[in-house]
Image (spheres, rainbow, N blue to C red):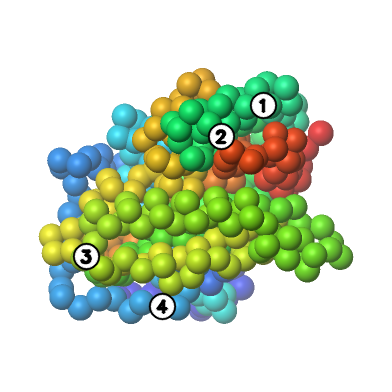
């Protein structure tokens, strides 16, 4: 592989500085995690044929050896290979066509900040270097004409929570993950989507931060903490999150202990673990689905989360497209049982979720990292749409759920300067 001699060209360039240098690209993708980052772009629309259950892109493993199963698999983005395809699915997939992109220019940073160009084509590598050497596009701070505000009042939200509790009492479901929409209006400015992403990851880092831009689609900006599916050869991982508390300086230990010991959050996570086990069991070798961690904490800048880890081995003839078909959308953002919970949520939410609660990330012939698109905004022209949600169970208190939703929205809004 030609690594492009990147360190001889710009030894101190950072992912966000590089992103600013290519901010006018028609197709632009950036994935930033705790172990490194990947930036990909193209000046042409490089969207490929859509993935469907009948006509998939071939992600069949080319050999019988599994790629290295690194300890951080499922915790953050792995090493994106040069052959990677980047993908973003809306929550309404497969009704909404997925965004599938394969840009020519890919640059990658490791955990030490070392940078390399991922290509075997020397001409493409030179073009990539030249693009990164030009002066960065000026990206002023994004300003908002209107701040981020929820579309529902507290009484409207409470009414929806109570309706879910009535369905639970009637035996329709055990849990439903209600998502509340928020909107804001951006002031005019150049490359506002890139600026907003830079502000977001600077102010609120996350294990699966991501940016997607391509023609005729909303730009997607996310600082998601949750792994939907990680694949390395025949091994697959899912790390559902269920349980959130505001992070308060000086009270971290107290709040973490409360989250660990809360019966409601424990029950919610247990239900979703069972749901994910059932989903993965449809494509895994019988007996290979294992809950390797029933509950650990993820500490972020504004919140604490509780999460579990499930691993499995794919059955013969099963590949990533089958995993996505079996498990999408993620159980942590739908409910249990999944199909009935989704029916209930469609009635209560009254509008599409779009990118929120879908998935995004990278994949190739034998590996993948796909995140759940929570803490995610869509930007179309000057309009920004964001959702925040929480799992509603029988003993949910509407006021506490309202506070949790706003804790999640506040972390996003404060990072981008959009909170009133």
First in sequence, mark 4 or 3: give its number: 4
First in sequence, mark 1 or 2: give its number: 1
Quarter of the picture holding the N terminus: bottom left
Mark 1, residue position: 157
Residue at point 48% right, 28% down? 170
Specify whether 157 is left or right of 80.
right
Q: Nearer the viewer, mark 3 or mark 1?
A: 3
Q: Is residue 303 above or below residue 13?
A: above
Q: Nearer the viewer, mark 1 or mark 4?
A: 1
Q: Position of residue 214 (x, y in %)?
A: 42, 39
Question: Contact (CB < 8 A) between labels 3 and 2?
Answer: no
Q: Nearer the viewer, mark 4 or mark 3?
A: 3
Residue at point 17% right, 54% down? 58
Q: Is residue 223 above or below residue 419?
A: below
Label 3 secondary element: loop
Q: Residues under labels 4 and 3: Cα distance?
A: 24 Å
Mark 4, residue position: 70
Q: Position of residue 297 (x, y in %)?
A: 62, 65
Mark 2, residue position: 178
Q: Does the image show residue 178?
A: yes
Mark 3, residue position: 286
């Amino acid at each position: 592989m030609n690594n492009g001699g990147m360190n001889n060209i710009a030894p101190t360039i950072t992912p966000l500085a590089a992103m600013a240098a290519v901010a006018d690209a028609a197709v632009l993708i950036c994935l930033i995690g705790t172990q490194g980052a990947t930036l990909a772009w193209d000046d042409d629309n490089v969207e490929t044929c859509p993935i469907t259950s009948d006509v998939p892109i071939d992600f069949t493993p080319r050999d019988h050896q599994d790629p290295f199963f690194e300890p951080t698999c499922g915790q953050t983005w792995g090493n994106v290979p040069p052959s990677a395809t980047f993908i973003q699915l809306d929550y309404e997939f497969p009704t909404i066509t997925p965004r599938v992109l394969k840009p020519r220019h890919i640059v990658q940073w490791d955990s030490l900040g070392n940078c390399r160009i991922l290509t075997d084509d020397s001409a493409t590598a030179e073009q990539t270097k030249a693009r990164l050497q030009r002066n960065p596009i000026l990206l002023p701070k994004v300003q908002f004409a209107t701040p981020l505000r929820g579309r529902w009042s507290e009484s409207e939200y409470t009414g929806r929570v109570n309706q879910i509790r009535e369905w639970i009492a009637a035996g329709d479901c055990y849990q439903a993950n209600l998502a509340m929409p928020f909107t804001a209006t951006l002031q005019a400015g150049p490359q506002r989507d890139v600026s907003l992403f830079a502000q977001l990851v600077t102010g609120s880092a996350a294990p699966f931060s991501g940016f997607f831009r391509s023609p005729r689609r909303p730009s997607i900006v996310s600082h998601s903490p949750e792994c939907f599916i990680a694949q390395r050869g025949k091994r697959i991982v899912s790390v559902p999150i269920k349980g959130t508390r505001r992070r308060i300086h000086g009270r971290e230990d107290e709040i973490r202990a409360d989250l660990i010991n809360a019966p409601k959050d424990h029950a919610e996570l247990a239900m979703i673990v069972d749901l994910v086990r059932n989903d993965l069991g449809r494509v895994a070798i019988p007996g290979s689905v294992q809950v390797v961690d029933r509950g650990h904490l993820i500490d972020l800048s504004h919140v604490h989360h509780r999460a579990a880890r499930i691993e499995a081995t794919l059955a013969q003839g099963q590949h990533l497209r089958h995993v996505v078909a079996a498990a999408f959308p993620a159980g942590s953002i739908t409910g249990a049982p999944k199909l009935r919970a989704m029916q209930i949520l469609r009635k209560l939410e009254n509008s599409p979720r779009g990118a929120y609660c879908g998935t995004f990330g990278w994949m190739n012939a034998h590996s993948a990292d796909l995140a759940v698109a929570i803490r995610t905004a869509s930007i179309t022209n000057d309009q920004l749409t964001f959702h925040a949600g929480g799992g509603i169970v029988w003993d949910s208190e509407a006021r506490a759920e309202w506070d949790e939703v706003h804790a999640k929205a506040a972390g996003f809004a404060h990072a981008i300067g959009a909170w009133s």
